[in-house]
Image: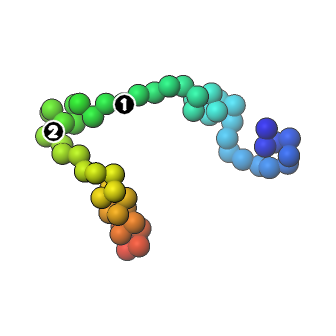
Amino acid sequence: MLFFFGVKTDVSATNLKTLCVSNFYSNRKATTQLNHQQKKIENGIKDAIKWFDLT
């Protein structure tokens, strides 16, 4: 649709179809086999902001 307005983008029809597929992921393997402990999303966002500020 953006093409019709003259906007150039790297998004193709195939990419758009892929984005519309319902994919669901689980952390079960990381939790059970790797003993991965999840953080609250707020902490993850704070850590990411700190990391980007340092780079």
Please state which amino acid type lies under the numbered disc 2. Answer: Leu
Disc 2 element:
loop
Q: Is residue 53 above or below residue 48?
A: below
Tell me the residue at 23%/30% (across/down): 28
Q: CA distance from mark 1 to mark 2?
A: 16 Å
Which residue lies under the disc numbered 2?
34
User: Number of marks in the image?
Assistant: 2
Tell me the residue at 37%/58% (across/down): 45
State the residue in front, 2 or 8: 2
Which residue lies under the disc numbered 1?
25
Q: Quadrant of residue 49?
A: bottom left
Left or right of 42? Residue 8 is right
CB atoms at circles 1 and 2 under 8 Å apart? no
Please state which amino acid type lies under the numbered disc 1. Answer: Tyr
Left or right of 23? Residue 5 is right
Disc 1 element:
loop
Q: Quadrant of residue 48?
A: bottom left
Left or right of 26? Residue 38 is left
Q: Which quadrant of the figure contains the C terminus?
A: bottom left
What x and y, as percent, mark residue 4? 86, 41
Q: Is residue 7 above or below residue 55?
A: above
State the residue in front, 31 or 10: 31
What x and y, as percent, mark residue 53? 41, 73
